[in-house]
């Protein structure tokens, strides 16, 4: 699957780009719609574990950490990081497409622009 997030009307839409667009509408079928997005990854390798709606990802991460700690893998449990909120779409997609990119994004998280305002700012600059 070649997954890609797009920001439309203030919501994140997840599409599988390998799926052919509808012959009627010309659009691909949406896999997920959410107002905020979360991504769980390994802090040391940057490998993406899960992504999607924040509640589901937080729940997944909590379960995985408990399972790993019970198995004695404390370091692996502590390496699971969840980042959620209005992330910039281009950064989010790079996390999905580039192996280890999440680790780089995590170090720059405080300086990243608000994900939902980024596109609006570009549109305002075009209109001016």
Image (tube, grey):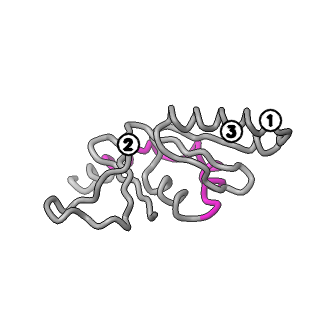
- Kindly identify the residue that appears in the image at 46 percent across and 63 percent down: 1
10 Å neighbourhood of mark 2: few (<14), some, or many (≥20)? many
Residue at mark 3 to residue at mark 1: CA–CA distance = 8 Å
Circle 2 SS class:
helix
- Kindly identify the residue that appears in the image at 56 percent across and 47 percent down: 50
Residue at mark 2 to residue at mark 3: CA–CA distance = 30 Å
Report which residue position mark 2 lands on: 116
Circle 1 SS class:
helix
10 Å neighbourhood of mark 3: few (<14), some, or many (≥20)? some
* Sequence-earlier tag: 3 or 1: 3
* Rendered location of residue 39, percent (x, y): 55, 45
- Residue 94 inside the magenta-drawn segment: no
10 Å neighbourhood of mark 1: few (<14), some, or many (≥20)? some
* Rendered location of residue 18, percent (x, y): 38, 67
* Rendered location of residue 65, percent (x, y): 72, 36
* Rendered location of residue 122, percent (x, y): 32, 53
First to last magenta residue range: 99-121
- Kindly identify the residue that appears in the image at 50 percent across and 35 percent down: 54
Report which residue position mark 1 lands on: 69
Most frequent secondary structure within the magenta stretch: helix
* Sequence-earlier tag: 2 or 1: 1
Q: Which image quarter: residue 75?
A: top right
Viewer-side residue, 45 vs 63: 63
- Residue 119 inside the magenta-drawn segment: yes
* Sequence-earlier tag: 2 or 3: 3
Report which residue position mark 3 lands on: 64
Which residue, as the protein is rendered here, is positioned at the far left? 24
Viewer-side residue, 119 vs 93: 93
Q: Is residue 15 left or right of residue 53?
A: left
């Amino acid at each position: 699957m070649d997954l890609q997030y797009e920001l439309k009307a203030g919501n994140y839409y997840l599409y599988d780009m390998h799926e052919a667009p509808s012959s009627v509408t010309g659009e691909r079928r949406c896999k997920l719609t959410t107002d905020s997005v979360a991504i769980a990854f390994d802090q040391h390798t940057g490998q993406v574990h899960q992504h999607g709606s924040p509640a589901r990802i937080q729940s997944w991460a909590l379960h995985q950490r408990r399972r790993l700690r019970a198995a004695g893998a404390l370091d692996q449990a502590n390496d699971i990081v969840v980042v959620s909120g209005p992330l910039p779409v281009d950064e989010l997609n790079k996390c999905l497409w580039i192996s280890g990119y999440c680790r780089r994004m995590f170090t720059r998280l405080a300086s990243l622009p608000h994900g939902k305002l980024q596109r609006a700012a570009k549109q305002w600059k075009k209109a001016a």
